[in-house]
């Protein structure tokens, strides 16, 4: 099987209507799973009294999974209804790249938040060192 044809512009930007070739249900379940994960994480953020870092991570992952799940469902629906413009395989590559870039930004944001939180804790410890303590 020649995999080179999958990355040619003619194949990626082809607007001819082609039915799913054996993996349409898997794509549907994956996108629905992303939406369900986003809803569950949104509920956890609203109910839970967890640390701020965990709630911030869950909120960002909830936004990521719900948005990408709904966009994926839109592309899946366009593919099943044979809408030519959004039927191109190129959109799935754009969707995947967008998902990975967004996930990378979420991870970088959490790393930066954790680093700032560690710096603030060490600053407070240095400040508290010079304050008088309660007598026992």
Image (cartoon, rainbow, N blue to C red):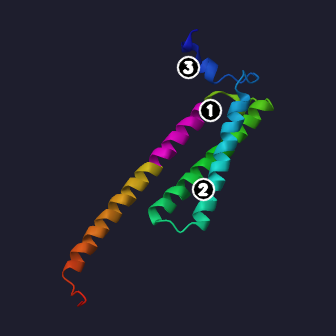
Q: Which mark is residue 7?
A: 3
In which quarter of the view is residue 122 placed? bottom left
Rendered residue at 68%/33% (across/down): 27
Whether residue 2 is visible to the viewer of this picture, yes or no, is yes
Q: Earlier in the sequence, mark 2 or mark 1?
A: 2
Cα distance in 3D space between marks 1 and 3: 13 Å
In which quarter of the view is residue 80 placed? top right
List x then y, in percent, for residue 70.
68, 46
Q: Is residue 104 magenta?
A: yes
Cα distance in 3D space between marks 2 and 1: 25 Å
Q: Earlier in the sequence, mark 2 or mark 3?
A: 3
Viewer-proximal residue, 78 or 103?
103
Q: Which mark is residue 42?
A: none
Whether residue 83 is visible to the viewer of this picture, yes or no, is no
SS assignment at label 2:
helix
Residue ID for mark 1: 92
Q: Nearer the viewer, mark 2 or mark 3?
A: 2
SS assignment at label 3:
helix
What residue span does the magenta drawing correspond to? 91-105
Crowd class of label 2 (few under 14; some 14 to 19; many from 20; radius 10 Å)? many
Residue ID for mark 2: 41
Rendered residue at 62%/44% (across/down): 68
Rendered residue at 21%/85% (across/down): 131
Q: For this view, does 25 lie left or right of residue 132?
A: right
The count of marks equals: 3
- Residue that lies at the very extreme toward the top in this rendered image: 1
Q: Is residue 98 above or below residue 19?
A: below
Contact? badges 2 and 3 (CB < 8 Å): no
Cα distance in 3D space between marks 2 and 3: 36 Å
List x then y, in percent, for residue 78.
75, 35
List x then y, in percent, for residue 17.
76, 23
């Amino acid at each position: 099987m020649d995999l080179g044809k999958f990355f040619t512009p003619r194949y990626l930007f082809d607007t001819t209507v082609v039915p799913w070739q054996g993996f349409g249900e898997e794509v549907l379940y994956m996108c629905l799973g992303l939406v369900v994960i986003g809803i569950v994480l949104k509920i956890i953020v609203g109910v839970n009294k967890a640390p701020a870092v965990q709630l911030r991570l869950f909120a960002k992952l909830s936004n990521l999974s719900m948005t990408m799940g709904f966009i994926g469902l839109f592309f899946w629906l366009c593919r099943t209804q044979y809408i030519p413009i959004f039927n191109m395989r190129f959109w799935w590559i754009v969707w995947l790249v967008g998902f990975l870039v967004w996930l990378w930004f979420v991870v970088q944001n959490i790393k930066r938040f954790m680093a700032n939180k560690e710096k603030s804790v060490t600053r407070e410890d240095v400040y508290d060192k010079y304050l008088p303590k309660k007598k026992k």
